[in-house]
Amino acid sequence: MKKDQMMEKVMSFAMKVQQNKYLSAISTGLMGTLPILMIGSIALLLAVLPIDAYKEFITNIGLRSFLMLTSTLTTSIIALYSSFAIAYRLAEKFKVEPMIPGVLAVLCFFMITPMVSAEVNGVAGSYLDTNMLGAKGLFTAMIVSLISCRLYCYFMEGKKLTIKMPAGVPPVIANSFAGLLPAIVVAILFMLVAWGFSFTSYGSMAQFIYSVISMPLEHLSSSMWSMVFIVFIQMILWFFGLHGSLVVQSFITALYLPMDTANMDALAAGVTNSELPNILGKTFYSCFAGIGGAGGTLSLVILMFIMSKSKKNKALANLAIVPGCFTINEPIVFGYPLILNPIMAIPFITVPLIQVIVAYASIAVGICPRLSGVQVPFGMPVVVGGFIAGGWKIAVLQVVLVLIGIAIYYPFFKISDKQAVAQEMGEISTEE
């Protein structure tokens, strides 16, 4: 009874996390920046492709500078795009017209971003610190977006500060005037906060957040064991029937996307793959934390496809093999099923953990290169995605990890398949 109560509390907590408006806004908002990241990633890959003749050609025709500019205007200022997207999504959660709070979040983010004095072409001036617009400022963008949007929504609730227009005024104009006073109040609050931080040793709110919150989290997330823990929680939730990947996605994105963008910035600056600052990242998670889907189920599908004696398992393998190669594993998770399956629990939970550990160790000792941080779209075929993320060695590493997964699944699958055959024989003899 105590175990059941404890598990009920765990599931209740997981559901609250999954349904949390703020975490959901971060997750969906950052997902909305994926096209920007993809454009920047492709441009960066084309600019730094390690073929000397190709590099010389695109440099001579002037194309390389535009490819690098595209990377700079996308991945290098991703915090700017994120500030709008996160606030936009949060406003939707609170049933508030989202355009104004999205734009307002960008303004507030600019307000707390430090300015630097510099002389360009003989003209002195003050400029935004672009370092804070990229990976370094991503966590700041998340916090500012959530706070500014929530304040705006609060002032909009119950028409506290809204200006009501006469009937017959077009909705676009009415909505703009309704949000005018709340936007002004929020902007003034952030201006005062920025002014207050200018008297501190940090100099700006952005630097304060980076020093006090972002840096400690970066140190925490740079540990392999932090990702192992997150993947473990994900798989426990999956085993009990919750979509664990959705629950942890917010944490994965918030903690590890900045590490990817930092790698892309370093790559754009001419740093070699072996010298990139981070081993882990969101791309690392996508490539290795369960190849073929949560639980590393591509290994199981291949095993079923080759060795199944059960008619049911053989049919399921034929159905699941192609989706599994594209990281779609719902047919196997729910069709086998792996949820609440005591025999398959150990490999289902441990395979992705082993895959993460082996992948990290292979990169850490220099067998495989560090990932560039390029965002690989969901559904990209296994091996192809690995090649895009880090080259042929990463693709080979994925194959090795799939084979390791097969070895771990094998003894448990053998028992499970034998039971399935016995059940089928029992059904046949009963019908006869």
Image: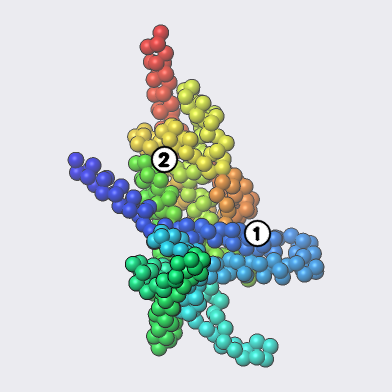
Number of residues whose C-alpha sits closer than 10 Å to that of mark 2, classed few (under 14), some (14–19) or many (20 or more): many
Q: Is residue 138 left or right of residue 375?
A: left
Number of residues whose C-alpha sits closer than 10 Å to that of mark 1, classed few (under 14), some (14–19) or many (20 or more): some
Closer to us: 395 or 199: 199
Q: Is residue 214 visible?
A: no
Which is nearer the N-term, disc 2 or disc 1? 1
- Residue drawn at x 52%, y 55% is 284
Closer to us: 337 or 410: 337
Q: Amino acid at mark 1?
A: Ile
- Residue drawn at x 42%, y 13% is 428
Q: Position of residue 283 (x, y in %)?
A: 53, 56
Q: Position of residue 193 (x, y in %)?
A: 40, 81
Closer to us: 430 or 15: 15
Is the residue 366 above or below the residue 131 in the image?
Answer: above
- Residue drawn at x 62%, y 53% is 388
In the displayed image of the protein, which residue is found farthest to the left? 1
Q: Which mark is residue 385?
A: none
Q: Position of residue 295 (x, y in %)?
A: 44, 42
Instruction: Please state, as top left, top right, bottom left or bottom right, where the C terminus lies in the image.
Output: top left
Q: Is residue 283 visible?
A: yes
Q: Which residue is mark 2?
A: 348
Q: Nearer the viewer, mark 2 or mark 1?
A: 1
Instruction: Please state, as top left, top right, bottom left or bottom right, where the N terminus lies in the image.
Output: top left
Element at label 2: helix
Separation of residues labelled 2 and 1 (CA atoms): 34 Å
Q: Amino acid at mark 2?
A: Phe
Is the residue 363 above or below the residue 206 in the image?
Answer: above
Element at label 1: helix
Q: Which residue is mark 1?
A: 42
Q: Position of residue 267 (x, y in %)?
A: 62, 66
- Residue drawn at x 26%, y 45% is 8
